[in-house]
Image (cartoon, grey):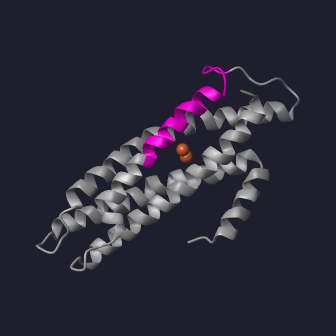
């Protein structure tokens, strides 16, 4: 896990770095969740189902349901960012770099999609909290086997990665986007 110093340095870096680099960084997270983390966690649930026995925690059904809710919500949320906000930020930055007025967009002010995405972020936080609660704070029961421990570890790592990602968007990208194009 990153230290507080590393987090602060990373934040400082992303407050200055070109916006398209920041967006590329965020897109890499999206891609990694879609092609690696979500399928791997799904596989871990499947494997546990196949080997379910008397020592498996009873929370697995509600935990799996909570994970699928998050995954479904994230698919929509990532598409909204990738298809609406991110291209708009890149266009606006390019126009500004060329000394041109901000491009007109179908959604009006930059604040409009940002408000929707902020609502998504709050919803995602609640879904992550539901996963954590269903997994009893990721404390595997004494009797749990290694597969359960691996699943809990992966879910906990996903939660940490999503918190860091959302923080970069809400605290840095959105604020910088509003400066590029105005409210
Ligand atoms: Fe994102
Ligand atoms: Fe987001």
Residue drawn 44% across and 38% down? 76
Q: Is residue 112 above or below residue 124?
A: above
Residue drawn 25% across and 75% down? 141
Magenta stretch: dominant SS? helix
Residue drawn 66% across and 40% down? 174
Q: Position of residue 2 (x, y in %)?
A: 60, 70
Q: Hey, which quadrant is residue 63 in on the image?
A: bottom left
Q: Which residue extends farthest right?
A: 99
- As rendered, which of 22 and 130 lies closer to the eye? 130
Q: Hey, which quadrant is residue 178 in on the image?
A: top right
Asked if residue 52 shows in the view, the reply is: yes
- Residue extent of the magenta highlight: 105-125
Q: Which residue extends farthest left?
A: 54
Q: Position of residue 168 (x, y in %)?
A: 63, 51
Q: Position of residue 120 (x, y in %)?
A: 48, 38
Q: Please check the rendered image and state whether residue 113 is part of the magenta-colored stretch, yes or no.
A: yes
Left/right placement of residue 131 relative to residue 157 reads left
Q: Is residue 144 above or below residue 123?
A: below
Q: Please check the rendered image and state whether residue 38 is part of the magenta-colored stretch, yes or no.
A: no
- For the C terminus, the quadrant is top right
Left/right placement of residue 120 relative to residue 52 reads right
Q: Position of residue 179 (x, y in %)?
A: 77, 35
Left/right placement of residue 62 relative to residue 151 reads left
- As rendered, which of 126 and 52 lies closer to the eye? 126
- For the N terminus, the quadrant is bottom right
**How many numbered markers are drawn?**
0
- As rendered, which of 183 and 21 lies closer to the eye? 183
Asked if residue 17 shows in the view, the reply is: no
């Amino acid at each position: 896990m990153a230290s507080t110093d590393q987090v602060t340095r990373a934040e400082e870096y992303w407050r200055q770095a070109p916006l398209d680099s920041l967006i590329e960084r965020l897109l890499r997270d999206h891609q990694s969740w879609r092609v690696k983390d979500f399928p791997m966690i799904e596989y871990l649930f499947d494997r546990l189902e196949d080997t379910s026995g008397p020592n498996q925690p009873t929370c697995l059904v509600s935990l799996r349901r909570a994970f699928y809710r998050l995954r479904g919500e994230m698919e929509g949320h990532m598409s909204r960012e990738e298809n609406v906000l991110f291209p708009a930020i890149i266009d606006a930055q390019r126009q500004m770099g060329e000394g041109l007025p901000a491009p007109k967009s179908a959604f009006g002010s930059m604040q409009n999609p940002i408000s929707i995405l902020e609502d998504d972020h709050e919803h995602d936080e609640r879904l992550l909290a539901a996963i954590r609660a269903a997994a009893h704070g990721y404390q595997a029961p004494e009797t749990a086997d290694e597969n359960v421990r691996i699943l809990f570890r992966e879910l906990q790592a996903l939660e940490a990665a999503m918190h860091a990602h959302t923080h970069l968007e809400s605290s840095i990208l959105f604020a910088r986007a509003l400066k590029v194009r105005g409210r």
